[in-house]
Image: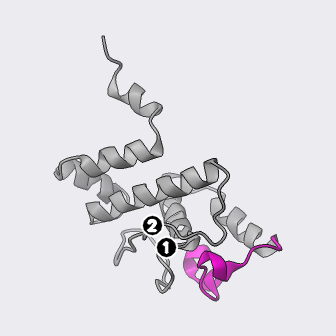
């Protein structure tokens, strides 16, 4: 074929491009089914998550700081099919909010992941880990989501 198949093109696409492609898809049952696969009823919420994840990914990939960075506002779901953070009183433009969504998605995609345990260990041992500056609420580790 003169053009490669879509799956081949998407393999080399950036997170930002995937986020924009998803956002610009027509709202229909197929688009809804993607959000529902991740236990979300709101397609716009999932689109927001993809955008925010692409910003965090780019910041990390280009050696930017995430310590006290202000990120785009990430949408917090009211109700999810899978377990989510119980304490939803935190800054939605800080690192913690995006990390909650990363863990939520990883719990679905790869239930045996070690990201959560690694993050908790990092926050326990890093002398520069100032939780407040990254938007972590007080007693965040007591939430069932993080246990």
x then y, percent, for residue 81: 36, 69
Queried whether the magenta region covers residue 106, the answer comes back as no
Q: Quadrant of residue 3?
A: top left
| Range shown magenta | 126-147
In the rendered image, which residue does mark 2 sit on?
72
Quadrant location of the N terminus in the rendered image? top left
Q: Position of residue 29 (x, y in %)?
A: 17, 51
Q: Is residue 134 visible?
A: yes
Label 1 crowding class (10 Å Cα cut-off): few <14, some 14-19, many 20+?
some
- In the rendered image, the residue lying farthest to the top is 1
Q: Position of residue 35 (x, y in %)?
A: 31, 57
For disc 2, the neighbor class at 10 Å (few under 14, some 14 to 19, many from 20) is: some
Image quadrant in which you'd find residue 125? bottom right
Considering only order in the chain, which callout, 2 or 1, is on the residue closer to the N terminus?
2
Q: Residue at x 56, y 66 (%)?
A: 99
Question: Where, quadrant-wise, is the C terminus in this rendering?
Answer: bottom right
| Residue at the disc numbered 1 | 93
* 82 in relation to 106, above or below: below
What residue is rendered at 68% in x and 52% in y? 63
Q: Nearer the viewer, residue 5 or 84?
A: 5
Badge 1 vs badge 2, beta-carbon distance below 8 Å? yes
Residue at 40%, 33% in the rendered image: 10
């Amino acid at each position: 074929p003169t053009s490669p198949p879509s799956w081949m093109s998407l393999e080399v696409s950036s997170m930002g491009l995937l986020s924009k492609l998803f956002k610009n898809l027509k709202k229909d049952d197929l688009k809804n089914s993607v959000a529902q696969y991740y236990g979300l009823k709101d397609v716009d919420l999932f689109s927001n998550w993809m955008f925010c994840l692409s910003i965090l990914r780019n910041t990390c990939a280009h050696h930017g700081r995430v310590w006290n960075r202000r990120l785009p506002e990430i949408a917090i779901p009211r109700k999810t099919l899978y377990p989510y953070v119980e304490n939803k009183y935190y800054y939605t433009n800080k690192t913690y909010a995006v990390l909650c969504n990363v863990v939520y998605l990883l719990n679905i995609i790869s239930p045996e992941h070690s990201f959560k345990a690694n993050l908790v260990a990092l926050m326990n041992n890093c002398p520069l880990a100032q939780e407040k500056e990254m938007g972590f609420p007080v007693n965040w580790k007591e939430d069932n989501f993080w246990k």
